[in-house]
Amino acid sequence: MRKQIAAANWKMNLTLVEGEQLINDIVEANIELQPNQQAIFAVPFPYLLSIKKIADKVANFKIAAQNCNNHKSGAYTGEVSAPMLQHLGIEYVIIGHSERREYYHESNEMLAQKVNIALENKVAPIFCCGESLSIREANTQNDHIEQQLKESLFHLTAAQMNGFIIAYEPIWAIGTGRTATSEQAQDMHQHIRTVIANQYGTSVAASVSILYGGSVKANNAVDIFSKPDVDGGLVGGASLIPAEFIAIIKSLK
Ligand SMILES: O=C(CO)COP(=O)(O)O
């Protein structure tokens, strides 16, 4: 049974004290998670260990970094490597968020390198894909997403793809309050699963968790997560508010 995941992406928000307060509030809610359900907190690099210490009180609460470099080590001032994350005990890393693709010019090819280096170091990628508004308006989103997956992931073996996590985040729905409808999310998630099935077979495709991201809130999470190919969400703004994110975790199926 594939994982159902509520992932918080704090982005570049909160002081450490505010972050600790937020995760403490969520821990204290004593949410009962099923064995296949997880909450993942993608926090700023300097907070990884402090937040991990609090999250570790709950078995299915995990920590993610928001990025890693595409090299193992070296003269890359200001960067953080996958081996560093592994040695901190960080289990996940977001790779290819649209904000990094846009502001830091991360190409599909560079993201393939990041995926490789994360996997080599046993940090599981949460690989993001998504289309811009102009691509959606031209109705070429399916081809666009397929290309992102092919160029960044399809060199992987079936064993590496088994249980992989992908986040579909339409750029036009991020931070805009304009969420995709649950039908639009389901259509794309089904497309993603079909593309994976064509490459790797149906059993690998069925094992991949596909999260939806883009203005997920407490009041739309149940509807979006109820769709058969939606395995939870990657949540920005609403993950910064305890009551909102608690409700989103409770909306997992
Ligand atoms: O980018 C996102 C999560 O990675 C989505 O952000 P919002 O939930 O704020 O739209």
Image (spheres, rainbow, N blue to C red):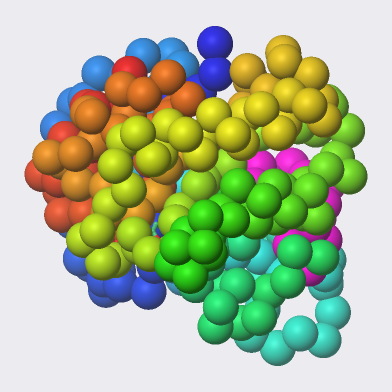
Report x, y in % for residue 107: 73, 71
Identify which residue is drawn at 66% across, 81% down: 105
Query: How would you classify the magenta stretch by its main secondary structure?
Result: helix
Q: Is the C terminus in the top left, top right, bottom left or bottom right quadrant?
A: top left
Q: Is residue 186 above or below residue 93?
A: above
Left or right for 119, reference 229: right
Where is residue 225 drawn, in percent x and y? 32, 29
Query: Is residue 89 covered in magenta?
Result: no
Residue 32 is situated, as x and y percent measured from the top left of the image, at 25, 18
Residue at image x 81%, y 65%? Answer: 109
Residue 77: x and y, percent? Answer: 70, 88
Q: Along the line of sight, which residue is nearer the eye, 15 or 242? A: 242
Q: Can residue 23 be seen in this view?
A: no
Q: Residue at x 39, y 57 (%)?
A: 9
Q: What stretch is highlighted in magenta?
A: 110-125
Location of residue 85 (image quadrant): bottom right
Task: Examine the rendering and report whether any part of residue 1 can be seen.
Answer: yes
Which residue, as the protein is rendered here, is positioned at the far front? 138
Q: Which of 71 and 134 is in front in this view?
A: 134
